[in-house]
C-alpha cells in the first residue's frame, strides 16, 4: 500500500555540478526536494520506488544497484540506485530522470530500504500508467514513491519548446491536482497535449495516481516555479 510520495522535478540542472554557474538559481527547488525526500523517510516505508520519464526503448524496471551518470551533461559524476551494490546490467544505465532521483536520495543519505526504479515511456497511456502504479503499491505493506517529472517546457519564448499559450493552464491543473492529491484529475491530463507541451511528468504522475488509489493520502505543494520556461513542482502526498 502506498503510504507516502514525493513529487520532484527531474532536470539534470538540479545537480549543482551540472548547473555550475547557474546552480544558485535552483537552490529553492533543491531545498524543497530535500524536504520532500525527508517526508518519505518519515513515513518509514518497506520499499521505495523511483519513477520517472524514460526515452522510448529505455523504459522498464531498474533494480537496486543500477548506476547512472551525468557524463552526457559534461560532468564525470556517477550515482547508484539504492545503497547496495548489486550485479546489474552495465549496458542499461539509469535514464536521466532516475539518475537525478538517485542523486536526491544519495544527498539525503537514504539507506536501509530497498530502492528500485521504473522508467515510464512518454507514449504510455493513462490506463497503463495507473496499472503500473497499482502494481507498485501492492508490492509491499508500506510503499513510498519518489516521482520525478517536469511540467510543460513551453512557458516563455526562451523555453525549450518556445511559448505555447496552453502551457500555463496545463501546468495550473497539474499543480492543483498534485497539491490536492487528486488522482482522477492527474489521470485526466491529456497525453497528447502533454507531449506537445513537452511535459515529461505526465506519465509518472499518472503512475502515482494509480498507486494512490484507496490510500487516502493528502497532498501539499512545497515549491512551484517555472525557471527557464519549464514548470517545476515539488509536492508531498502523505
Image (spheres, grey):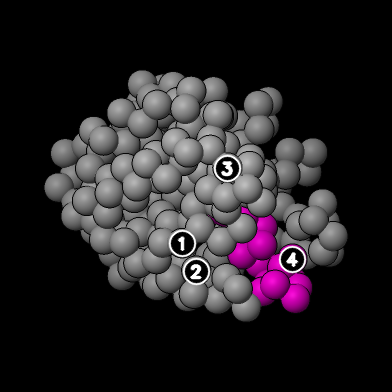
Residue 177 in the figure: left or right of residue 98 = left
The answer to which of marks 1 and 2 sits earlier in the sequence is: 2
Residue under the point 66% across and 62% down: 13
Q: Which mark, by number, is residue 48?
A: none
Corner quadrant of residue 18: bottom right
Q: CA distance from mark 4 to mark 2?
A: 15 Å
Q: Are marks 1 and 2 in contact (CB under 8 Å)?
A: yes
Mark nearest the camera among 1 and 4 is 1
Residue under the point 71% across and 52% down: 68
Q: Which stretch appears magenta?
A: 9-23
**Secondary structure beneath label 2:** helix
Q: Is residue 127 visible?
A: yes
Q: Which mark, by number, is residue 29?
A: 2
Q: CA distance from mark 2 to mark 3?
A: 23 Å
The answer to which of marks 2 and 3 sits earlier in the sequence is: 2
Mark nearest the camera among 1 and 2 is 1
Mark 2 burial class by Cα count in 10 Å: few <14, some 14-19, many 20+: many
The answer to which of marks 3 and 4 sits earlier in the sequence is: 4
Mark 4 burial class by Cα count in 10 Å: few <14, some 14-19, many 20+: some
- Nearer-the-camera pick, 18 or 100: 18
Residue 57 in the figure: left or right of residue 204 = right
Q: CA distance from mark 1 to mark 2?
A: 8 Å
Q: CA distance from mark 3 to mark 4?
A: 25 Å
Please give the residue where the numbered disc 1 appears in the rendered image: 225
Residue 76 in the image: state x and y as whole percent. 84, 64
Q: Are marks 3 and 1 in contact (CB under 8 Å)?
A: no
Q: Are marks 4 and 2 in contact (CB under 8 Å)?
A: no
**Secondary structure beneath label 4:** helix
The answer to which of marks 3 and 1 sits earlier in the sequence is: 3
Quarter of the N terminus within the rendering:
top left
Mark nearest the camera among 3 and 4 is 3
Please give the residue where the numbered disc 4 appears in the rendered image: 18
Amino acid at each position: 500500500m502506498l503510504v507516502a510520495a514525493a513529487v520532484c522535478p527531474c532536470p539534470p540542472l538540479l545537480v549543482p555540478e551540472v548547473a555550475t554557474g547557474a546552480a544558485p538559481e535552483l537552490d529553492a527547488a533543491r531545498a524543497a526536494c530535500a524536504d520532500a525526500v525527508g517526508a518519505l523517510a518519515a513515513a518509514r516505508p518497506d520499499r521505495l520506488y523511483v519513477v520517472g520519464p524514460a526515452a522510448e526503448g529505455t523504459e522498464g524496471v531498474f533494480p537496486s544497484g543500477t548506476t547512472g551518470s551525468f557524463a552526457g551533461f559534461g560532468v564525470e559524476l556517477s550515482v547508484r540506485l539504492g545503497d547496495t551494490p548489486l550485479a546489474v546490467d552495465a549496458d542499461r544505465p539509469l535514464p536521466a530522470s532516475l539518475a537525478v532521483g538517485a542523486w536526491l536520495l544519495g544527498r539525503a543519505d537514504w539507506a536501509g530500504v530497498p530502492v528500485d526504479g521504473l522508467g515510464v515511456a512518454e507514449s504510455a497511456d493513462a490506463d497503463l500508467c495507473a496499472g503500473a502504479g497499482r502494481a507498485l503499491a501492492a508490492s509491499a505493506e508500506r510503499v513510498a514513491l519518489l516521482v520525478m517529472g517536469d511540467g510543460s517546457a513551453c512557458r516563455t519564448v526562451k523555453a525549450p519548446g518556445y511559448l505555447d499559450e496552453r502551457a500555463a493552464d496545463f501546468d495550473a491543473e497539474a499543480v492543483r491536482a498534485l497539491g490536492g492529491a487528486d488522482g482522477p484529475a492527474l489521470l485526466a491530463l491529456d497525453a497528447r497535449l502533454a507531449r506537445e507541451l513537452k511535459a515529461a511528468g505526465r506519465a509518472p504522475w499518472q503512475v502515482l495516481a494509480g498507486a494512490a488509489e484507496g490510500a487516502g493520502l493528502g497532498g501539499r505543494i512545497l515549491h512551484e516555479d517555472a525557471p527557464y520556461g519549464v514548470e517545476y513542482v515539488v509536492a508531498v502526498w502523505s
